[in-house]
Image: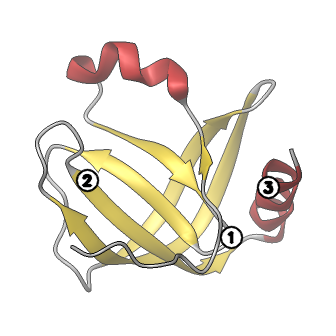
Amino acid sequence: MSQQRRQYDRIDVNQEFRSIDEFVAEYVTNISHGGVFIRSKNPLPVGTRVNLKFSIIVEDFEFIEGEGEVVRVDTTPGNMGMGVAFTRLTSASLDLINRLVKL
């Protein structure tokens, strides 16, 4: 896949999970205003609509809730997962993402 300029800057999150990767089935590795990348051993096909509810470790656990659509699948060993574009977020989730990006 060629390197394309992303519409939004990505923020790495949940670094704590990387050391226990073999025990965790799925977790978010980065987030932007437009969506998230979810590390997964079983990524869903492109076009799949998903309900989202996941935690982000900032100073404490906080939650992002909404809906999205799988727009990219990565099957590279060690980085297997899916890019999910947000289609709807709760207002609290949008506020949290805005705070994260400003950090």
Q: Mark 1 or mark 2, which is nearer the start of the sequence?
A: 1
Q: Does residue 47 sit above or below 80 in this rendering?
A: below
Tell me where residue 101 appears, x and y as whole percent: 79, 55
Residues under numbered marks 3 and 1 in contact, where contact means CB atoms less than 8 Å apart: yes
Tell me where residue 41 appears, x and y as whole percent: 15, 43
Q: CA distance from mark 2 to mark 1?
A: 19 Å
**Image quarter (top left, top right, bottom left or bottom right) of the C terminus:** top right
- Which residue sits at x=60%, y=57%? 10
Residues under numbered marks 3 and 2 in contact, where contact means CB atoms less than 8 Å apart: no
- Which residue sits at x=59%, y=38%? 13
Q: Three-letter amino acid code at disc 3? A: Val
Q: Three-letter amino acid code at disc 1? A: His
Q: Mark 1 or mark 3, which is nearer the start of the sequence?
A: 1
- Disc 3 is placed on an element classified as helix
Residue labelled with disc 2: 81
| Left or right placement of residue 50 versus residue 97 in this view | left
Residue labelled with disc 3: 101
- Disc 2 is placed on an element classified as strand
**Image quarter (top left, top right, bottom left or bottom right) of the N terminus:** bottom left
Residues under numbered marks 2 and 1 in contact, where contact means CB atoms less than 8 Å apart: no
Q: CA distance from mark 3 to mark 1?
A: 8 Å
Residue labelled with disc 1: 33
The one of 74 and 90 positioned closer to us in this rendering: 74
- Mark 2: give few (<14), some (14-19) or many (20+) Cα within 10 Å: many
Q: Does residue 58 sit above or below 44 in this rendering?
A: above
Instruction: Say the numbered circle drawn on residue 25.
Output: none
Tell me where residue 20 appears, x and y as whole percent: 33, 14
